[in-house]
Amino acid sequence: MVKEKVPVTCIAFFLTFDKQCKQKIESLQTARQPKIPVRVSKQAYYDYI
């Protein structure tokens, strides 16, 4: 969504809602070094606020 606006070096981590989404993001990063960490947190989403 912000590919052309935010340098990758400014991304500390990706935050996802579940492990399935985490695995998808990790698979998309196979060639990227170093990889950007991916975290899972259901509490970071609106349904849990």
Image (cartoon, rainbow, N blue to C red):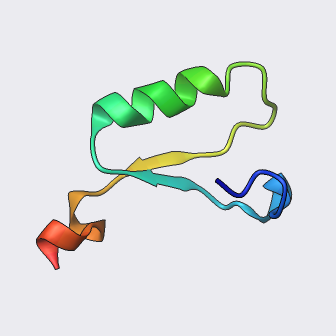
Q: Quadrant of residue 27?
A: top right
Residue at image x 77%, y 20%?
31
Left or right: 45, with 5 as reference point: left
Residue at image x 59%, y 56%?
13
The correct choice, above or below, for 27 with respect to 25 in the image is above
Question: Could you say where residue 26 lies in the image, as x and y percent from the top left?
Answer: 55, 29
Question: Could you say where residue 3 lies in the image, as x and y percent from the top left?
Answer: 77, 51
Q: Quadrant of residue 9?
A: bottom right
Question: Could you say where residue 38 lies in the image, as x and y percent from the top left?
Answer: 50, 45
The correct choice, above or below, for 29 with respect to 38 in the image is above
Left or right: 9, with 37 as reference point: right
User: Which quarter of the image is occupied by the C terminus?
Assistant: bottom left
Residue at image x 67%, y 28%?
29
The correct choice, above or below, for 31 with respect to 26 in the image is above
Taking the view exactly as shown, the residue that stands out farthest to the left is 48
Left or right: 46, with 3 as reference point: left
Q: What is the count of numbered marks?
A: 0
- Identify which residue, 6 or 37, lies in the foreground: 6
Question: Could you say where residue 39 lies in the image, as x and y percent from the top left?
Answer: 43, 50
